[in-house]
Image (cartoon, helix red, strand yellow):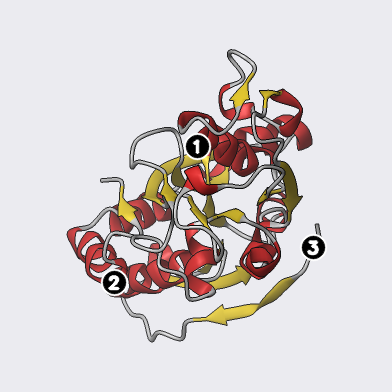
Amino acid sequence: MTKTFLPALALAVTLSAAPAFAETYKIGVTPGPHAQILEAVQEVLAPKGIELEITEFSDYVVPNEALASGELDANSFQHQPYLDNQIKDRGYDIVSVATTVNFPIGIYSEKIDSIEDLPEGGSIAIPNDPTNGGRVLLLLQENGVIKLKDGVGTAASVADIVDNPKNLQILEIDAAQLPRTLPDVDAAGINTNYAEQAGLDPVNGAILREGPEGPYVNIIAVRSEDKDAEWVKALVEAYHSDEIKQFVDTTFNGAVLASW
């Protein structure tokens, strides 16, 4: 996975009052809804004298590296299973301090209209990170496309497929690149933020879509040492405000679901 990130998207806001929040807090996000929501959160925080510097990252690996190293103060881009996997693999001292929004993952196709129409020997592209790839595999299992080993849960991988009746090829590809694969595969499991960036319709354009329930609600993460900091409490309060819930509901029209 290429570890690159886009230039910081600094939100210039003239702040006053609240001397306890004299510093700027750096928040890492992926492009699209996460960035848009944090920009709205900035407006809620401004009267409290808190400024956010929002930095967009083009993949799912660098934001946790940057948070753990101190380049960021928080990030908002991942769900708990992904963070758990990162902590296990890399030993990060990072914790979740709040849930944010859910992006039901979808399976899209330019060639078929229903998952039942997948051809014998067809191809499906899935994210190459463990939790989001497993997420698509679970969705395929729930709809009778494949069968996985018992008990694998959110840790499911291609190696856990025990029955593949149509002999489908499962291609693991960087999540951000998946929309580009659609002309070349029969279907692809694509995260909502990348689907929207590519002009896909997450609500009506997917041939298969996750339900809103499950463990994949996104989170705000910080270093463990900051979990009780006053600025973190203020960030969570602003994110969980009625203003932000209304922003999510009206901006994304069901493609993104507020968790609070």
Q: Is residue 209 visible?
A: yes
Nearer the camera: disc 2 or disc 1 = 1
Q: Secondary structure at mark 1?
A: helix
For label 1, the crowd category at 10 Å Cα-Cα, with few meaning under 14, some 14 to 19 and many 20 or more, is many
Disc 2 marks a residue whose amino acid type is: Thr
Relative vertical location of residue 154 with respect to residue 226 in this rendering, above or below: above
User: Label 1: which residue?
Assistant: 139
Q: Is residue 228 visible?
A: no
- x then y, percent, for residue 3: 79, 62
User: Label 3: which residue?
Assistant: 3
Q: Which residue is located at x 22 percent, y 69 percent?
A: 250
For label 3, the crowd category at 10 Å Cα-Cα, with few meaning under 14, some 14 to 19 and many 20 or more, is few
Q: Is residue 49 left or right of residue 163?
A: left
For label 2, the crowd category at 10 Å Cα-Cα, with few meaning under 14, some 14 to 19 and many 20 or more, is some
Disc 3 marks a residue whose amino acid type is: Lys
Q: Quadrant of the N terminus?
A: bottom right
Q: Is residue 91 left or right of residue 201?
A: right
Nearer the camera: disc 1 or disc 3 = 1
- x then y, percent, for residue 33: 43, 67
Nearer the camera: disc 3 or disc 2 = 2
